[in-house]
Amino acid sequence: MSDEDAKRNAAAAALDYVEDGMTLGLGTGSTAAFFVEFLAEEVADGLVVRGVPTSESTRRLAETHGIPILPIEQVERIDLTVDGADEIDPGANLIKGGGAALLREKIVANASDHMVVIADASKAVEQLGAFPLPVEVTPFGFTITAKKVYDALCATGITRPKVKLRELPSKGTPLVTDGGNYILDCSCQVIPDPRATAVALSVIPGVVEHGLFLNMARTVILGDSEGAELLE
Ligand code: 5RP
């Protein structure tokens, strides 16, 4: 089995949740991109939906594939969001932000009646934390903010975390998000109390958003070589 097949199977299964007339949050990442491509085939066959993208890359992909796009400022609510994840625990709590889109992803998910997470089965974990937790911060004062983030992680039970500025591959310059911010990738190994960590990070001045998505996903679809397993 390739990861690609597993992602594709998860993305295809999410189409079952799409209904004519829906406003859809469109996630970011390789799995979400498969969903956009499958959705585009339905749109070409006459399905009427409007997409609210969670990143500029997804906006470009959706537009290229002929999916009508609405800026989030023009919608009051979103029926359904389909997005990927970097880790998923048994309670459907997530780490997201591997693709640096966590801020828009969280705003869109929070505006949605229903969030469906699609991923290959390797993203399911017993406990969150092996994937470095992305934290989006303002460029202003980011070195000070990074120290406060480190302190917050330690204070919520994480042992010897490492906080690292995300850089563009091979360029040595900070990656800048769609919102003009930086990302701190926080290696935690295990996050023993995700709720406490989420709260501690949220109150730090300079932290724009963090990649812990707690109690947001209602449905998880895990793809594998056979098809997809549904967890609700
Ligand atoms: C982007 C995300 C992605 O959904 C996450 O990184 C999963 O990506 P992929 O589907 O490529 O594995 O959170 O910010």
Image (spheres, rainbow, N blue to C red):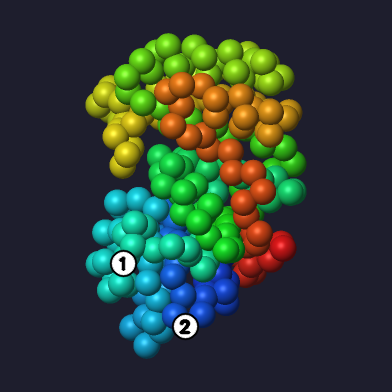
Q: Quadrant of residue 33?
A: bottom left
Determine the CA span between mark 2 and mark 1: 15 Å
Does residue 54 lie above or below 167 as drawn?
A: below
Q: Residues within 10 Å of mark 2 (few under 14, many from 20)?
A: few
> With 9 as the anchor, is 173 left or right in this view?
left
Front one among 140 and 169: 140
Look at the image and tell me in which quarter the C terminus lies. bottom right
Mark 2 / mark 1, whichever is N-terminal: 2
Front one among 225 and 141: 141
Residue in the picture at 40% in, 76% down: 49
The amino acid type, in three-letter code, at marker 1 is: Ile
Give residue 69's mark.
1
> Is residue 117 in view from this perspective?
yes
- SS under mark 1: loop
Does residue 139 lie above or below 18 as drawn?
A: above
* Coordinates of residue 65 in the picture (x, y in percent): 29, 71
Front one among 42 and 155: 155
Q: Quadrant of residue 72?
A: bottom left
Residue in the picture at 34% in, 57% down: 73
* Coordinates of residue 188 in the picture (x, y in percent): 61, 24
- Judging by the rendered image, the residue that carries numbered circle 2 is 20
Which residue ends up furthest to the front in the rendered image?
76
* Coordinates of residue 201 in the picture (x, y in percent): 56, 26
